[in-house]
Amino acid sequence: MPAPGYLAGLRAWCDKRGLLLIFDEVQTGIGRTGTFFAFEHDGVRPDIMALAKGLAGGVPIGAILARDDVAAHFVKGDHGSTFGGNPLAAAAALATVREVLSPGFLERARKASARLVERLRSLEDRYGLVTEVRGRGMLLAIGLARDCSAELVDEARRRGLLVNNVRPNAIRLMPPLTVSDDEIDRACNILEASIRALEGAGSK
């Protein structure tokens, strides 16, 4: 996550030099961090932005958004794709955007995230293996006291939970924005059992 004020400073730096600010929201956009776009947390708007992944709810699609005055410099043929113009992907993206922007959707996702973070932080309080919980919305990571993320991923998978080892000492959790409270509790119970297995049942 960017440090507080970093993106605002970067925006000012680009403006001073007449440079375009481009954000990659491929993984963070479309509600993933609790707001429609992640940059909204910092009140900073990019000139160009890349989107994909969550844009169509699992259907492959990518998009580039730009300010009107920037987009005016693109002419036909400047940007193309051999897979562009797919009507199925476009329809899926439209349906996804409408759903995420529907009343109460993001608020429900934020509440689910708060529940998940609370459960994860309780693991941080009780197990020495867990050193931190970081992230925003439904894009979270758990820091580990030693390089055992691959073992933790395997342990969780054996119990029915899929998580990702992004570093030797960290795992990533990216549940769907529609995750239920029961699913959060089940996932955290599995994660705790997996941590306990790696720790040999030791606690703080």
Image (spheres, helix red, strand yellow):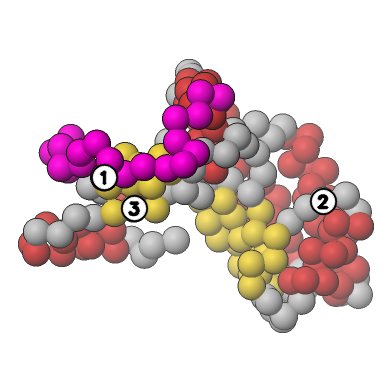
* Percent position of residue 103, x then y: 48, 18
Displayed quadrant of residue 14: bottom left
Return the x and y of residue 32 as percentages of the image width and height.
Answer: 52, 42
| Tag in front: 1 or 3 | 1
**Which is nearer the eye, 80 or 197?**
80
**Can residue 169 be seen in the rendering of this structure?**
yes
Question: Marks 1 and 2, Cα distance to the nearest angstrom?
Answer: 44 Å
Q: Which residue is mark 2?
A: 161
Q: Percent from the top left, x then y, of residue 157?
A: 85, 56
| Disc 1 packing (10 Å; few <14; some 14–19; many ≥20) | few
Say whether residue 112 is visible: no
Dot 2 falls on a residue whose secondary structure is: loop
112 is higher (above) or lower (below) than 145:
above
How crowded pointer 3 is (Cα within 10 Å; few <14, some 14-19, many 20+) is rated as some
Disc 1 target residue: 78
> Residue 23 — which label?
3
